[in-house]
Image: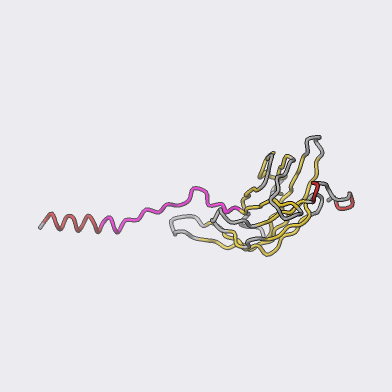
Amino acid sequence: MRKLIGIIVFTALLAACSSTDCPLNNAVYATYNLYGSDGKRYTLKDTLTISTARHTEGDTILLNRKTGATTFSLPVSYADEADRLILEMRDSDNNVTTDTIVMSKTNRPHFESTDCSPSFFHTILGVKCTRNRIDSITINNREIDNDATKEHIRIYFRSGNQPATAAHNG
């Protein structure tokens, strides 16, 4: 009988205990895929560096010198109403073209457990860009959460990989 009571108490203690597996990194990422003006997946031949403006001083590099880019995932800020990304594309002759993407969004806290710090999920409200090398940009999936398989933004590049006229540089 004592053995049975001991097993019942041990089982009850195990059931009462919970282990919370908080994520080590609770940053949420938006996924950007590249397309040609023909609508087919696109590989950028240039070296791509992406930065964003900081609240304090200078810029922060989010992606540094990526070659052969077809897709990339970048963290989404949890405090700002919009994220501003500066894409720098450097060709083999060292010519640099930049485009800017601005994604406006909502930020909402998401709690896995009271033992874990919150992550922030987002809803994309709109996206706009300069058009030096980028032809257009569209939203494929508005909801940004911890599902890394989603394609959120589609970036369409000009055919022939050529920049627009100098009047559009900015």
Q: As rendered, which of 106 and 68 lies closer to the eye? A: 68
Q: Is residue 16 magenta?
A: yes
Q: Is residue 28 left or right of residue 85?
A: left
Q: As rendered, which of 76 and 69 lies closer to the eye? A: 69
* Magenta stretch prevailing secondary structure: loop
Q: Residue 72: image x %, image y %? A: 64, 48
Name the residue at the left extreme: 1
Residue 92 appears in the rendering: yes
Q: Is residue 167 left or right of residue 85?
A: right
Q: Residue 97: image x %, image y %? A: 80, 44
Query: Where is 121 relative to 57, above or below?
Result: below
Magenta residues, as a range? 13-29
Q: Residue 34: image x %, image y %? A: 69, 50
Q: Is residue 15 left or right of residue 24?
A: left
Give the quarter of the image for residue 5.
bottom left
Q: Is residue 102 magenta?
A: no
- The residue located at (74%, 51%) in the rendering is 36
Colour option used: secondary structure
- The residue located at (80%, 35%) in the rendering is 94
Q: Residue 124: image x %, image y %? A: 65, 62
- The quadrant in which the N terminus is found is bottom left
- The residue located at (74%, 40%) in the rendering is 46
